[in-house]
Amino acid sequence: MSVDWFKQLAAYNKWANARLYAAVLDLSETSYRLHIGVFFGSLHGTLNHLLLMDRLWLKRLTGEGDQPNRLDDIVYEDRMELTRARIAEDERLITLIEKYDEAALRGLHSYKTTSGMPQSQVLGDILMHLFNHQTHHRGQAHACLSILTGAEPPSLDLLVFQRGGTAPGLQKLTLT
């Protein structure tokens, strides 16, 4: 995969998260926290996991930031704080991807697993995992919205993004 492809995935990631969070901010607190049987229990648990894992990978890739102790940690109890952190992490990921070139993507990157074991992988493969992981759990969050609202949540399809899809409610996500 090329640098341009990863730049597109980083931009898509930001766009899809913005659409998802815009819908999430409209939910009642009870619905947002309701345990509905997804892997991390609730929409709140799922969104925290996504942020947590992005932080874990960005720490591994840059050496900067927080390293979680558990994969199910709740990083933020407050939904607005979680939203602000999500926006910041998406920008951080875009900035990081901008720094890579084709040679870097083909090179090995060394890091430690959560259990402290040394690991080396091709950087492009790590990035593919990071974006695939986002899509996987964002899909779970999308299903949560369907279940909780009984309505069709906003489309998160990559093709919609590529066709210039807009993100209704995005103004909610320019939080300061």
Image: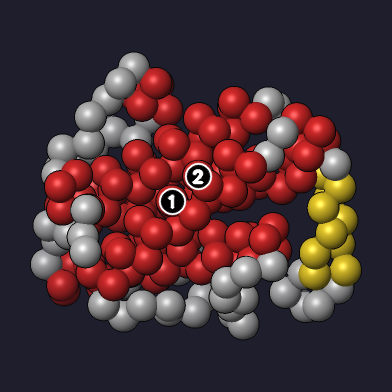
Real-space Cα separation, disc 1 to disc 2, in angstroms: 5 Å
Q: Residue furthest front?
A: 99
Above or below — where is 7 with respect to 140? above
The kind of residue on which mark 2 rests is Ile
Which of 128 and 40 lies nearest the eye of the viewer?
A: 128
The residue most toward the top is 163
Quadrant where the N terminus is found in the figure: top right
User: Does residue 29 sit above or below 137 in this rendering?
Assistant: below
Tell me the tag on residue 91.
Answer: 1
State whether residue 132 appears in this view. Answer: no
Of the pair 102 and 45, the residue shown nearer to us: 102
Front residue of 11/133: it is 11
Q: Are marks 1 and 2 in contact (CB under 8 Å)?
A: yes
Scheme by which the image is coloured: secondary structure
The quadrant holding residue 59 is bottom right
Kind of residue at badge 1:
Glu
Q: Which residue is mark 2?
A: 94
Name the residue at 69% across, 58% down: 61
Q: How many marks?
A: 2
Q: How far across and down, in percent of the image, does residue 47 sit?
A: 39, 63
The residue depicted at 35 percent of the width and 48 percent of the height is 17
**Mark 2 surroundings within 10 Å by alpha-carbon count, few (fewer than 14), some (14 through 19), many (20 or more):** some
